[in-house]
Amino acid sequence: MSNVDDNTMKQPTGPTAPPVADVENQTNPATTSTGFGVPAIVRRWKREDLIKRGSLALRGLALLFSLLAFIIMASNKHGDWKNFDRYEEFRYVLAIAILSTLYTAVQALRHVHELSTGKHLIQQRTSAMVDFFGDQIMAYLLISAASSAVPMTNRMREGADNIFTDALAAAISMAFLAFLSLGLSAMISGYKLSTQSYI
């Protein structure tokens, strides 16, 4: 058995051909995979464009949900104890929905202007900080308002489930969805803030 193994090991190996050089493709594969050059710049532009459009879409959703929470809560007046303004929890939801609607409308308009004209109304660094902190503050206010109104709505629904309590639940749900949209937008704003160059 060892003779067979010895014969295969003793076979001479012929000369190996040198690697064939690609005459048409003169790029070094090591330099193309390091992230430098035109392909890396194009990838970065596409990523930045996707982030801008995603941020605008999330702000648009937050605007829609905030506006719906505002409209549903403000129109929830059915007489006697079925008026939202008799309860401070629901007035708080209305106030925060109004603030969120105004904030997201201004931010969405600013982003539309920047995407359509390519010009920034304020410096990019300041804009990133305003986006991040504004989104954080509004998201926390929205979840605070929604969570303060949930216990009162649940107590009312135990006694009587009617159009008043259904409208309250709908407004609270819209405030919660606005919170989710602004929370995701705050994550994108934080990413943009952390990847900015400070030169």
Image (cartoon, rainbow, N blue to C red):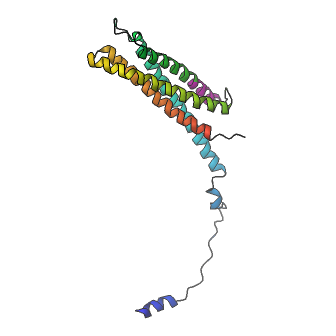
Q: Residue at x 42, y 10 (%)?
A: 85
Q: Nearer the viewer, residue 195 or 111?
A: 195
Look at the image and say whether residue 163 sits in the magenta stretch.
no
Q: In this orientation, which residue lies closer to the viewer: 183 or 89? A: 89
Is residue 5 placed above or below 21 in the rendered structure?
Answer: below
Tell me: 120 left or right of 143: right
Question: Residue 174: in sight, yes or no?
Answer: no
Residue at 44% x, 14% y: name it: 91
153, above or below 120, in the image = above
Residue 108 lies, with reference to residue 78, above or below; the image says below
Q: Quadrant of residue 47?
A: top right
What residue is drawn where x is 47% and y is 88%?
8
Which x, y percent locates residue 37?
A: 67, 51
Magenta stretch: helix, strand or loop mostly:
helix
Q: Is residue 15 left or right of residue 95?
A: right
Quadrant position of residue 72: top left
Location of the C terminus (image quadrant): top right
- Judging depth in this view, the residue of 83 and 86 nearest the camera is 86
Q: What is the magenta range? A: 107-118
Q: Relative to 165, is 96 on the left or the right?
A: right
Rendered-image quadrant of the N terminus:
bottom left
Residue at the image point whose x is 37% and y is 18% from the top: 168
From the top left corner, tell me how far across and down residue 36 is, in percent.
66, 52
**Is residue 173 among what the camera can see?**
yes
